[in-house]
Amino acid sequence: MTSVQSAPTRPTVEFTSAMEQHRSFLLRLARTQLDEALAEDAVQETLLAAWTGSERFNGDSALRTWLVAILRFKIIDQIRARQRHRGVNHICSGDGMDSPDDPFEALFDEDGRWLEAPQDWHPDVAEDVARSQLVRLLEECMKRLPGPTSRVFLMREYLGFEPVEIAEQTGLAAGNVRVILYRARMSLRSCLALSVPMEPTNVQ
Amino acid sequence: MSNSGGMPPAHPSKQSGPDVPSSLTCRETTLIVSAARDAEVSGEELAALARHLETCERCQAARRQFTQLFQALDDLLARPPAP
């Protein structure tokens, strides 16, 4: 993440440039919830709000964290407006949500026991470095989630909607929302397990 | 859309408190860990999870993975701390 300690009352060129570096990540988040035009608008409004309110950025958090938090409210505003104007927006099916097969069955034996022992993700580096490395890898892994899964997952994990509200917003059954959230987390765990340097383990 | 997906409920053998199974499978523990991210799970489920974790090193490692995954999600998405 870009290191920006604080912003003066009037944003500097450096501050504006640092904000722009996060535009693509913000757009990826917004596109999971909104169509292209609205996503662009939400991100533009986020950057504008950050630019005009830069004096409120005190540097305690990373600039991206601050922008992501601002964008959260812009997206929620758009979703609420969409619901007011168009009624419940039903999510498309597909994405294997209706598949009778659980793609994670293969991780377990017939008794429900892990076939392969999960291994600790403890690269031989300092904890804060390992944590930031994990965040970078997670960002990559999240790109691989199918679109509808990503939308539901981020409604929960990013926007903070309760599962019942996700069901109302998407037209999915509440049980399907739980399935999608479970599968997304299992997918991300599996993706990270393939990406993160492992610590030798004696787990049986 | 029906609740399909071939996935069992988070607590397949549980109907109410006293019926929570005393032992869980590894797979069932992943369902509970995911469900706990979205809502409070029952004390019986937590107790069953704790009993399983006491003796299952694989699930201990998986639990640590999920904890790190959730921390990374909180970092990446600037998720506000839980109340």
Image (cartoon, coloured by chain):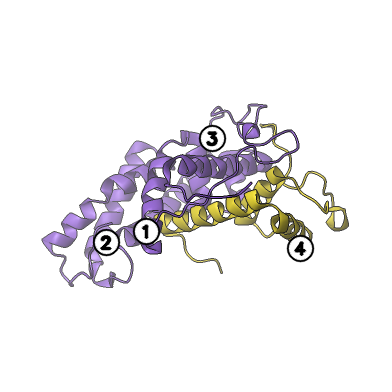
Chain colours: A purple, B yellow
Mark 2 and mark 1 lie on one chain; the one further toward the N terminus is 2
- Please identify, in this view, whether the residue under mark 1 or under mark 4 is nearer the observer: 1
Question: Label 2: chain?
Answer: A
Tags 3 and 1 touching, CB below 8 Å:
no
The residue that disc 4 covers is: B43
- Label 3 sits on a secondary structure element that is loop
**How far across and how far down the image is residue B27, in percent?**
69, 43
The amino acid type, in three-letter code, at marker 2 is: Ala
The residue that disc 1 covers is: A125
User: Compared to B5, does B15 lie above or below?
Assistant: below
Tags 4 and 3 touching, CB below 8 Å:
no
Q: Residue at x 83, y 54 (%)?
A: B22
Question: Label 4: chain?
Answer: B
Label 2, label 1: how many angstroms apart (C-alpha)? 34 Å
Where on the picture, by quarter, is residue A116? top right
Label 2, label 4: how many angstroms apart (C-alpha)? 43 Å
